[in-house]
Amino acid sequence: MYTYDTYDHAMLADRIAEFRDQVERRLDGRLTEDQFKPLRLMNGVYLQLHAYMLRVAIPYGTMNSAQMRTLAGIARDYDRGYGHFTTRQNLQYNWPALVDIPDILDRLAAVEMHAIQTSGNCIRNVTADPFAGAAADELEDGRPWAEIVRQWSSFHPEFTFLPRKFKIAVNGATADRAGIRVHDIGLQVVKNDAGETGFEVWVGGGQGRTPRLGQLIKPFLAPEDLLSYLTACLRVYNQHGRRDNLYKARIKILVEALGAEEYGRQVEDEWAAIREGELKLPVEEIARIRAFFGKPQSPTPAPVPVTENSAFARWLDRNRRDHSVEGLSSLVISLKPIGGTPGDITDAQMDAVADLAERHAFDEIRATPDQNLILPHVRNDALEAVWTGLVDAGLAIANAGLATDIVACPGLDYCNLANARSIPIAQAISNLLDETGLSEKAGDVTIKIDGCINACGHHHVAHIGVLGVDKRGEEFYQITLGGAFGVDAAIGSIIGKGLAGEDVPAAIARTLETYLDIRAGNERFIDTLRRVGPDAFKEAIYAEA
Amino acid sequence: MLKLDRKDDTHPIADAQLAAGGGRIVELAGDADWRDARAEIAGAVRVDIRFPIFNDGRGFTLATQLRQRAGYAGKLRAVGDLIPDQAQHLMRVGFDDVDPDRKGQDADWARARTRFAHAYQPGQGNVTPLFRHRHNRQDRDLAALNARYRDQTPQDILRDAIENEWIGKIAIMSSFGAEAAVGLHMISQIDPATPVIFLDTGRLFAQTEQYQRQLTLELGLTNIRLLTPDAEAAAEEDSDNRLWRRDPDACCSLRKVRPLDDIIGDYDALITGRKRFHGGGRMALPVVERINGRIRVNPLASWDAAAIEDYFQRFDLPRHPLTDMGYASIGCWTCTAPVQGDGDIRSGRWLGQDKTECGIHTPAPIADEQVAAE
């Protein structure tokens, strides 16, 4: 993984000094709250319902054991002994004190981490396929490009006060696990006929109030032009994105208003003026960054163990993924215990994951958009040892990709934007689907829950989405069906009127039962749904409601 | 109005014209289209871009486009609801100065505009983005660097060298000799933790050792790196302690050149106290040079004896105890004598020999290509 050089360390130190100064100026009144707010947000500091929240960036989801231990230590020393992994591969602390935050930032900086641009109307933390560098279906590891974009977007003089937040994702595999079509800009690594690397550029995707799928505006962008082209994209957006209406300020609205073709034409015009300039990436820099992202070797490859232990076998079956190197596997560590809070992890569990990564997994850990963790590189002969370690830590949950692997935003339990609770709904669904055995029977299904239309929980792109809304002081939940996150990205359709919270788990259980009744052979839930259409489930959802 | 650029005045003629009541100022809104603005700003002496609220970032893009696409090279001012935290953003997209609505925060603006020593992106005003800067270091155009440093004070040169050019990879070499206090004092004012390399040859005057302790303490230097000759090599090559007499070059090699060679890889650049007025081969000394592939920075190259003396007096710096006894340049006791009559300052070194330099600042006998190329 990437290691900071003197310059990166200096930039980070300067940034922390700047933030200390800003806190001081806020306290003595030189900065008003209106002025301080965007500045603290750009350092990851939110004001939530009960306390400040600090969102730590995990660039493209990649961490080592020292970083994970630092996250654990901060949870222990400054929070309530846990952290929360988000859908954008970040980690949130829900209870830090404002005065402690500069010290927390110092501790993060010591292990080359930060909270820079995890919020605010700027270019946010860059995300990538969590299996990058390991996936069997990968063309090329996308993370070097994500790192190049991370650096370019940090403290950008022109793009720090954008109309609205701006999210970039990079995917280097044939499957899309980064969600490039639901990002403001999605970069898909492709190869041309000559075998050279380039990018498809997808623009204008996003969820929230007005969900849209990104559109392809550039089928092949040469790598050395990456930064000049991104600059042109942002420049058109910064100048023409709407600033009169918060809800219409994202780039998706601009792209829709202009049409992707016209937006692309304006980008080309800007790009032509700067393409041959200072933004052209030097080949030495591309090589320098790429050299940090090697692939581990397995000199004496062992097969995946065959085991009599049914719990271990079940976990291998659900949570193990093929690796591009023979003798290695990737493992999903589910943060979705039955009835638990999706994405939460205790300090002791973080330490346990760090120990396992250090001992058995080439010192690498990933955070995923599904609020889980991954050990991307594990030797097959160490799989049992890792599983045993996870059992001891309470983290050997064999439900990766199942209906109980639920994604949920923090909702009204924490967030001051939320209209409704999402965590208790997730817990109730998880309990019911586990008790009834439906989670196991239904196989691959995604369920994602949001407590408001901002859709941090990605309900729009879930096979089954749940959206909490507030109607005259009462919480209701709308069900959407047919969304998807990936190459076949789709926005789910709203089925009908909202349900009361207590009716949601049973409605979802009936939906899965209906699927099991009508599926053809081994058809997956999403394939059945696409074949028969969402209306076929309407009756199941509203049966007793 | 607050200047953003570190230079004194970027547009003196425009300023003079405006001060005399002449010249046209054009104000543009942040959402103006640069193409439409071209005709309007033609012939303007100053262009102001208004920020209605500080977090409306359109003015940053408009400034960039006026500079990059419209080719506007005149004075550019940011006006409106701006906050000090935006100083570097404004400077790097091409503004010369700023007139913020909220006054009385000059100190915050001044601090903010030098907040970051580096940048990940290119920008106006010769900002080299890190993705390029990282790879320029070995091939840096010394001529350009020397041109930049030509009119700068030694303090400015040192500050730039330590905090910008070779951050974390630079050390100062000091003999703790007659003039050493000047450079060391300057360093102590910039970053007293800058490594100070001190070659303890085993042949130093006791007074030099005393002086080294005194200066270190008084200037608050926190990172003295003492280098001594390899004990085994010394026992073998100089068993009778007479090597300095038999073969002074071999003695310098054992006691100075090789100990330095052992650690030189830790740094990209070394600061020296050499000056042109020392004479001999130093008369053409550049501020920045490359010796055997490594950078030497000579911030005091242009200073003469009077400038040194002024500096000692101005800061009331302690003197090397031997200067009162006529020693103007002080090395090992074996090879240093007081200056005789009106001999030049280093004439007491290796007195009676052709030798004038110990070898730590001279190219290796086989000149490498990089040196030849310069």
Image (tube, coloured by chain):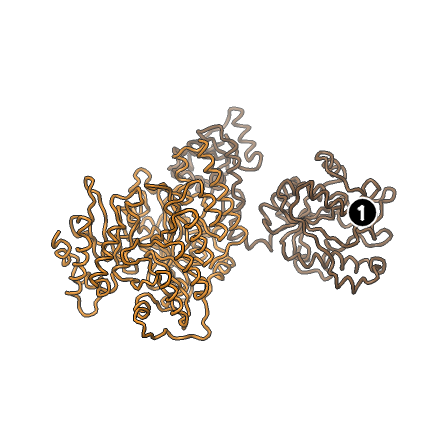
The answer to whether one can see residue A210 in this image is: no
Residue A327 vertical position relative to residue A343 in the rendered view, above or below? below
Crowd class of label 1 (few under 14; some 14 to 19; many from 20; radius 10 Å): many
Chain A is shown in which shade? orange
Q: Closest to the observer: A134 or B372?
A: A134
The C terminus of chain B is located in which quarter? Answer: bottom right
Position of residue B178 measured from the top left corner of the image (x, y, whole percent)? 77, 43
Residue displayed at 79% across by 60% down:
B250
Q: Closest to the observer: B257 or A356?
A: A356
Q: Closest to the observer: B149 or A128?
A: A128
Q: From the rendered image, report the letter of the chain displayed in brown.
A: B
Residue displayed at 24% across by 45% down:
A420
Position of residue B50 measured from the top left corner of the image (x, y, whole percent)? 41, 33
Residue displayed at 66% across by 56% down:
B264
Looking at the picture, which amino acid does disc 1 mark? Arg
Position of residue B88 measured from the top left corner of the image (x, y, whole percent)? 49, 40
Residue labelled with disc 1 = B346
Q: Describe residue B118's horizontal placement relative to residue B154 as left or right.
A: left
Q: Describe residue B262's horizontal placement relative to residue B355 as left or right.
A: left
Dot 1: chain letter? B
Residue A116 vertical position relative to residue B359 in the rendered view, above or below? above
Q: Residue furthest top?
A: B21
Residue A209 vertical position relative to residue B74 in the rendered view, above or below? below
The answer to whether one can see residue B279 in this image is: yes
